[in-house]
Image (cartoon, helix red, strand yellow):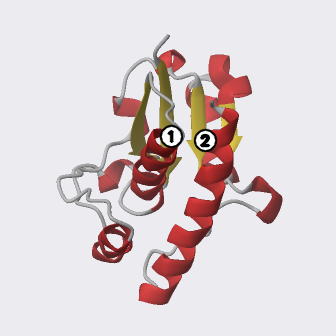
Amino acid sequence: MNRKILCVCSGNTCRSPMMQAILQHSLKKLGVNGVSIESAGTIKESTSQRINEHAALELRKRGFSLEQHMSRYVSNIGDLTVFSLVLCAGLEQATEVRALCPEIADRIQIVNAESGGIPDPWGQGPEAYEKCASMIEAAMDKISRTLK
């Protein structure tokens, strides 16, 4: 059975693309197949932007590349009920996705919820992106084990 996962942050230029790349890698390491992962953002004005340069650098340091990534607005994806899991960077994104598609409320999960989600590094220096990527890596490792 093919499962679909959606990673969501605000602009789809930092956190959600990092979640997507890192989760794909974590699942591959565990030998988990049949999972496709996408990402999107809740800010319409961010549509069609490239991945943030600091986020891209952090991914390259970890051996991933999303240089061709173009941000998407979550409302433009279409039918959200096709996703078996929606991973949101924080409560704000989870609330917005829930409002768009109440039918999937039970499939929405806030990443790193026990610590308030994944803090947005936007507009901060490289250190904030490194910390963000490390938090995402730890969270995606944990999530990937639940998907085995």
Q: Amino acid at mark 2?
A: Ser
Task: Name the secondary structure under disc 2.
Answer: helix
Q: Identify which residue, 108 or 42, lies in the foreground.
A: 108
Q: How many marks?
A: 2
Residue with the mark numbered 1: 27
As drawn, 91 above or below 4:
below
- Crowd around label 1: few <14 · some 14–19 · many ≥20 (10 Å): many
Q: Quadrant of residue 84?
A: top right
Residue at x-position 61% and y-position 69%: 119
> In whole angstroms, how far apart are the C-alphas of marks 1 and 2?
6 Å
Q: Quadrant of residue 61?
A: bottom left
Residue with the mark numbered 2: 144
Contact, mark 1 vs mark 2 (Cβ under 8 Å): yes
As drawn, 51 above or below 74:
below
Say whether residue 120 is visible: no
Residue at x-position 57% and y-position 61%: 136
Quadrant into which the C terminus falls: top right
Q: Position of residue 82 (x, y in %)?
A: 48, 16
